[in-house]
Amino acid sequence: MRLQFLNNPIARKRFQYFREMKRAYFSLWILLILYLISLCAEVICNNTPLFVRFEERSFFPIFKFYPEDIFAGNGIHTRPDYHKINNTPAFRDHPGNFMVFPPIPYGPFESIRPESIELSDQVTLKLTQVPMIGTVNIREDYSIARFAQFAYFIGKKDEEIKNLILSDYIDFPGEIKQAVTSRFANQKALSIFSKGSRRDNGDVVISLSTFLPRKKSPKTVRLMFREVNAEGQNPLEIVFPGPFDRLTENNRLNEGLLSDLSGQDRKRITGNIQHRFSGPVDDILLSIGNINYTASFIKEEVRFPFGPVKGHLMGIDGAGRDVLARHFCLLTSHFS
């Protein structure tokens, strides 16, 4: 057949023309290579080892079925979980007993055991500044009638605020002034958000809620203030490596910003760090130097889907399966 092809001048001419079409010629070789790979896909991607050496005997599980009892001696005659058996003392503590897995040692339908994934044993304390929020009710001359959590915005104490003229401390944009005027005139007005500025060079977001006309014009108008400078602050992160050491952690909490913590807050943080090594804990709210922070306690945990880690170069999907193994088997299945 091959000789007839080579002796046929028309066939040789067509083949030569095909070779000159580089894109088609190389595509053919790529398809042939992928086809050959698909024929041996099970020795490239599989959760069954290619070779097992156990008690001076050789086994070839990829070609022959062996019950679990042979390697575990537990009387179970079903298919073994070779990854689990490979981590038993019989293999871990005896160099003469070993398994040789394929280059991708996971099956496309195998769920990865969470305990097999190596994680860093450390807790990160993350402090994120919480923007200050306060409200104030003003009269028509912008004098303060009532307020809540507002002293921070004008640098005063609570007992000093009432009856102060708010416009002496806050520069209002024109749209906010117009919105206030409309409400005192008892006119319908939509909610509004706008950025104003404090006289101490700090920006604030000023907002008013929707207003509907009433029987009588309002005596006061309520404004809400939200700090914007805090939103651009990078969170402070401090890493506490395991195992937990109370003396060491207390010393680290005396550094920088954390040196202003009260004794009670320091105790709360230390307790949460200690508990986070063994399980989840809730975020807590702290006040340091009259600024509020959310303290989060972060520890890496196995939750599927999971990103790339050692042994799983493309990560793990939502069902706990190795993504590389699934993609490889999906690709080769089209050519087999």
Image (cartoon, rainbow, N blue to C red):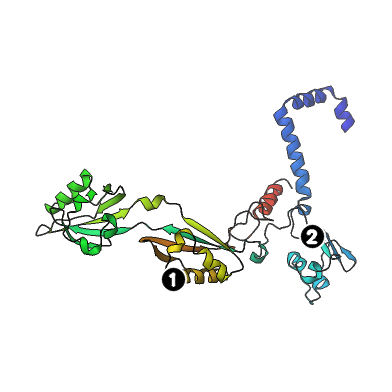
User: Residue at horizontal 48%, vertical 68%?
Assistant: 269
Give SS at disc 2: loop
Dot 1 or dot 2, earlier in sequence: 2
Q: Nearer the viewer, residue 180 or 312?
A: 180
Q: How many marks?
A: 2
| Residue 61 visible (yes or no) | no
Q: Would you place residue 300 above or below residue 30 in this image?
A: below
Mark 1 Cα within 10 Å, few/some/many (few <14, many 20+)? few
- Kind of residue sitting beneath label 1: Gly
Give SS at disc 1: helix
Q: Which one is closest to the eye, mark 1 or mark 2?
A: 1
> Where does label 1 land, which residue?
263
x and y, in percent, of residue 220 in the image: 15, 58
Mark 2 Cα within 10 Å, few/some/many (few <14, many 20+)? many
- Kind of residue sitting beneath label 2: Pro
Q: Nearer the viewer, residue 329 or 104?
A: 104
Q: Nearer the viewer, residue 115 or 304?
A: 115
x and y, in percent, of residue 244 in the image: 59, 69
> Where does label 2 land, which residue?
49
- Residue 136 in which image quadrant: bottom left
User: Residue at horizontal 66%, vertical 65%?
Assistant: 113
The span from disc 1 to disc 2 (Cα, nearest Å) is 57 Å
